[in-house]
Amino acid sequence: MAEQSMPNQSLNQSSQRSLKRSNEPVFWALFGAGGVVAAFLLPAVILITGLAAPLGIPSPELFSYERASAFASSWAGALFLFIVISLSLWHGLHRVYHSSHELGIHRGPLLSVIRLVCYGTALGGTVLSAYWLIAAL
Amino acid sequence: MATRRPYMRPMAGWWRRNPFYLFYMLRESTAVFVTLYALQLLYGVYTLTVGQAAFEAWLARLQHPVYIVFHALALAAALLHAFTWFNVAPKAMPALYLGTRRVSDRTVVRVQFVIFFVVSAIMLGVALGG
């Protein structure tokens, strides 16, 4: 009925287009969940795997293959790693994608490529981390 | 109409013009480090599935100064992200009530910092305590 009362065809089309359901809430939810995970967990996790482990502080034995794989192949450890990796990717890449607007890329094929690479990497990282962690269980 | 060329204010480098915008872009750039670190950790998980030699080669590569500097920057970025995230949380979430009294924004921010320190201490204790 609303469509019939609309006199202008192009206006009608554009209003229909704007009513198309957006998928943004899904990505925003993953961004938000990832933001919480990155804020509460990442500083300590980076300190452990990025600085303490390679430098062998407080002792190199703590970062042996046996201990790391025991952690990753435990149910809780695998879930922890999956959440940290996948949600950090969804958080970080959503933010990177939306930064293209700030850097002057507002529309067009380049933006589509950036979107595909960002969300594709997040999805790929999620699938791969699940696959490798389940394989190690 | 085809020759109409309205004036458009140049926007290139807009975020370098004002300290507030500069800090905004610095905050957004933490996402680059979050992403790169997550990919790096994902690769570490992959080496665990390959075997001991691959895992030890990965750990040895992380000793390179480039990786140490990267992880130091990633740690700083994660801390900046945490600080800004806790501070905007009261603005992004629905109001909390204890009974009939509204929990103040300042309390919400402080409680998150307390949780952050407790959770971080537990993780560091478990991982580095042996």
Image (cartoon, rainbow, N blue to C red):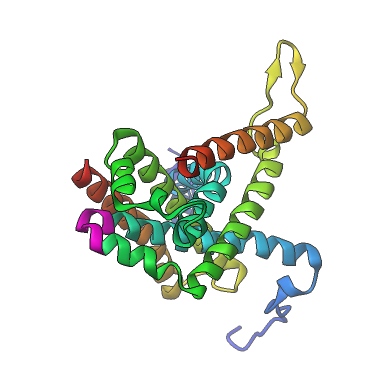
Q: Position of residue A126 (x, y in %)?
A: 33, 50
User: Which of the 4 image quarters holds residue B40?
Assistant: bottom left
Q: Position of residue B110 (x, y in %)?
A: 73, 34
* Residue A18 part of the magenta segment: no
* Residue B50 part of the magenta segment: yes
- Residue at the image position 51 percent from the left and 43 percent from the top: A37
Q: Nearer the viewer, residue A77 or B65?
A: B65
In this rendering, position of residue B36 left or right of residue A70: right
- Residue at the image position 67 percent from the left and 41 percent from the top: B86
- Residue at the image position 36 percent from the left and 61 percent from the top: A121
Q: Position of residue B35 (x, y in %)?
A: 47, 60
Q: Magenta stretch?
A: B47-53
Task: Determine the residue located farthest toward the top in the rendered image.
Answer: B99
Q: Nearer the viewer, residue B73 or A49?
A: A49
The kind of secondary structure the magenta stretch mainly shows is helix
Is residue B58 visible in this depiction of the protein?
yes
Is residue A100 visible in this depiction of the protein?
no
Q: Position of residue A14 (x, y in %)?
A: 47, 56
Whether A117 is drawn above or below B103: the answer is below
Query: From the image, which quarter does the N terminus of chain A lie in?
Result: top left
Whether A15 is drawn above or below B10: the answer is above
Query: From the image, which quarter does the C terminus of chain A lie in?
Result: top left
User: Which of the 4 image quarters holds residue B50?
Assistant: bottom left
Whether A56 is drawn above or below B68: the answer is above
In the rendered picture of this protein, how many numbered marks are placed on residues? 0
- Residue at the image position 30 percent from the left and 51 percent from the top: A129
